[in-house]
Amino acid sequence: MAERKIRILIAKPGLDGHDRGAKVIARALRDAGYEVIYTGLRQSPEQIAAAAVSEDVDAVGISVLSGAHGYLFPRIIELLREQGADDILVFGGGIIPDADIPVLKAAGVAELFTPGTPLADIINFLRERYPE
Amino acid sequence: MSKQQWTDTALAKALERGKERKSFTSTSDFPVERLSTPEDVHTDYETAIGYPGQYPFTRGVQPTMYRGKLWTMRQYAGFSTAEESNRRYKYLLEQGQTGLSVAFDLPTQIGYDSDDPVATGEIGRVGVAIDSMKDMEILFDGIPMDKVSTSMTINAPAAILLAFYIAAAEKQGVPPDKLQGTIQNDILKEYSARGTYIFPPAPSMRLVTNLFAYCSANTPQWNTISISGYHMREAGCTAAQEIAFTLADGIAYVEAALKAGMDVDDFAGRLAFFYASHNNLLEEVAKFRAARRLWAKIMKERFRARKERSMMMRFHTQTAGCTLTAQQPDNNIVRVAVQSLAAVLGGTQSLHTNSKDEALALPSEETVRIALRTQQIIACESGVADTIDPLAGSYYVESLTDRLQEKAEAYIARIDDMGGAVKAIELGFIQREITESAYEYQKAVETKEQVVVGQNQFIMEKVPVGGLLTIDPETAAFQVRKVTDVRKNRDNAAAREKLAVLRAAAATDDTNLMPLILDCARIYCTEGEICNELRAEFGEYRATEVL
Amino acid sequence: MLHKEQAGFDELLARGQNNDKRAIGRMISCIETGGTADHHMMQQLWSHTGRARIVGITGSPGTGKSTLADRMVKYWLTKGYRIGVIAVDPSSPFTGGAILGDRVRMNDLALVHEVYIRSMSARGQLGGLSLACSGAVGVLDACGYDIVLIETVGVGQSEVAIMNVADLVLVISVPGLGDDVQAIKAGILEIGDVFGVNKADLPGADRTAKELKAMLDMNPNMGEHQPPVLMVSAERSQGVDELCDAILENYAWMEESGELLKRRNRRLREELLSYMQDRVYRQVLAPVIENDSFDKNIKDFLSHARNPYVWAGEIADRMEEKLK
């Protein structure tokens, strides 16, 4: 039987259809050896939290480019808490102004990656959290 | 001396002394020629390049090009509420902008009213929230709708927003035939790249052709579609793929309209196109020229169009948002200038220049002004607008134009074999090609094979950026109140009746829905209500996710 | 984290039987991870299993399996069943990573209390479907799920492997896939209990169905019980009810005729065998090989300085000795 793989849900909450970033991250994580569960566009926070719980993922990566991050991130974290899944790491990326980053981190987002972040930084972040 | 002789003698010696910096490839994956000479150009001037305003339009669609009239400077704008956006539009017109371009928020783009729970957090974020004709009246308050040319970036619910526009114009006393502008109305690229679809392909294509037919009879100055490569390019495809996938979508629309019984020359002249302009200046210029020539050929040979206008690829260009960096954002001004230059040298009909802060937030008034000034400098100071298609005859640009066209034609042939663009999207082919290219590009950036100044080279300590546009948190509540009031103050019995009529017509195949949607719009049915009737009849599209 | 959960496996199971999806997810992860932990779990689970109907869905890529699974689940929900779905995707062979995207077609079901969906990668194991998959089926069975659907992409070995986890196999084909008939000839024919021709609204669907029936008729291995061939369009939700009913009717026949028992016998044998192989390998063989370092000798093997078969034989002998 195989060893336990780190499982990561990559999700696009809200109505934004720009999934280039999410798809590129999904591929990069796959190539780095992770098991990536991709949920596709227009997922409600409720659907994302339910998927994270059912799939028993280690982390949820959320991509938001529409400016709705101030609502979506905290809502997903709240729902995970309600389901006793607050050990699931939540990280994210997208067009997120600097001023909003401390607010989101205070809400429980582990890390935020803004445009231009090398993929290697994201992978390193996960490697540090989940050493092999 | 032939090119081969030069390569074997002078060049060989130089290469012995020192190697070249690296291998050179264009974004479309072909090697960049070290040197192009007359030997690399195989085209016949008369038939393949020709004269502006004449088939095959390689050199441009008008005989005078920018000597007659400059391109339309059209900044895509819209945020928050109709009230706020109206103020921004007036500011842009005062600054010398010559056309409006409306950006809608996501709930509007996907057919939900502002008080729908799925709209939470998204109201007024990426564009203006328009729930009913009421908002459209406010958006154009004090802007004469018979004078301004308006572009609307709206796709799945295009028919509804156009109906709001026509109805609002009627209230201003402007009849439909006086309206000028463009509606994006390009659903296929929503499936393949942009993601704001609502209905499945078949009913969506019906709405597209219903709009074509309605406009052909009622709004002769209106461009009924803007077939868009821009979003596919933003999603990661190459220049050659951008031509191919855009024109393949174009072919699908023409076929749909023909199937609906229209004559090609009745609608083809109102088809417009929309491309991105990237940093690789010469490749981009060649791209615009190749696309123009290829579309003319397709319209003439495949669809037997008779009118010259039906063969003209008129297009809007936007500088490439995905090339902008969040790091050292001032550098983006330079990128935008290079990209704008490419668009103008490529013969664009209208242009949006991105603002330097768009990798960080929606643009502020100040940054939009700089972007507009960039266009004005190119138009008035650079001299490139003074002569037509100035890069024609460049050995390199001509050979690149040929090669891009060839590559695009090969893609289109593959898509034809699959059964056309709709099928290729259903099979996930186009999405897969785009995603592949995006990932390849990202890997090149990671290895620094592709340099992005300020991002992976020439990096500086991050400086906080100020003056970003923020959306007033009260916007959502204000918008919700407005739509609730609209529903309270209208004739609800009439609204229910007109919505029922629309639903019944949607169930049939042959009724043009556009006049019925207009009936609903006039009596303040909301966008969400109209879309829900259509959703109930048409169902909703589920994406083929391709990774 | 996992170890803490192992200790509380009984508690996890109790929560899972109360349809706590967090607990179900955790149990499946423990089983996926393998190791000594899952042994205890498999033992605990066994007494609670045997009730669920385990249905496999397979077919070539592009046959619309996930969408069909979504529609089938929705139909069975109306009949009051609780349904578990396990979507198995192929793993990227080079890095061991994978992108699991089948959930996308079933997003509507994410919030339905009576449905549990889990994505799994085949993790490069022979046969595609891993032991972990039958473990996951066991968890869902023990937690009171009435039907467990296992959806797997039909390439290479995995179609055959689905027989090792499912009671009944639904094979999906579509018109116009060209090589589909070839694929059917290559072995799917033998494993299908029910055949569905999806995208029945496309031209050529009738012909595909006819060809399938003709091939089933000609198959000498087929007994009296002929597998039904049904036309269905998942996209338009047409024929899904009939397909689901046919599956359960077939299931009923399997129960009555003793076929189900026969298959479960065979499956349990296979499963136990590979389970034991796996444990013997890890508990007995792996430490020995490690001591004798395969890596150390590999150079000698390849240069023919040493005979690898002699080496392998010696290890086997040494183990036999040890067991005495």
Image: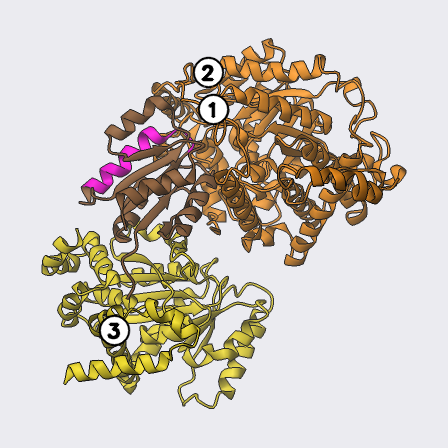
> Which residue does the image show at 58% across and 24% down from the upper left?
B335
Secondary element at image label 3 = helix
- Residue C311 or residue A103, whichever sits in front: C311
C72 sits to left or right of B30: left
The answer to which quarter of the image holds residue C15 is bottom left
Q: Amino acid at mark 1?
A: Val
Q: Colour of chain A?
A: brown
Between label 1 and label 3, give the one nearer the viewer: 3
What residue sits right under mark 3 in the picture? Answer: C281
C105 sits to left or right of A53: right
Residue C202 position within the rendered picture, expressed as x and y whole percent measured from the top left: 57, 63
**Marks 3/2 same chain:** no
**Marks 1/3 same chain:** no
What is the spatial separation of the Cα atoms under label 3 and label 2, in whole angstroms? 70 Å
Which contiguous range is marked in magenta? A65-81
Does any portion of residue C178 appear in the rendered image?
Answer: yes
> Which residue does the image show at 44% across and 48% down from the upper left?
A27
The orange one among the chains is: B
Specify whether residue A67 is painted magenta: yes
Q: Mark 1 belongs to which subunit? A: B
Q: Mark 2 belongs to which subunit? A: B
In the rendered image of this protein, does residue A26 appear above or below residue B281?
A: below
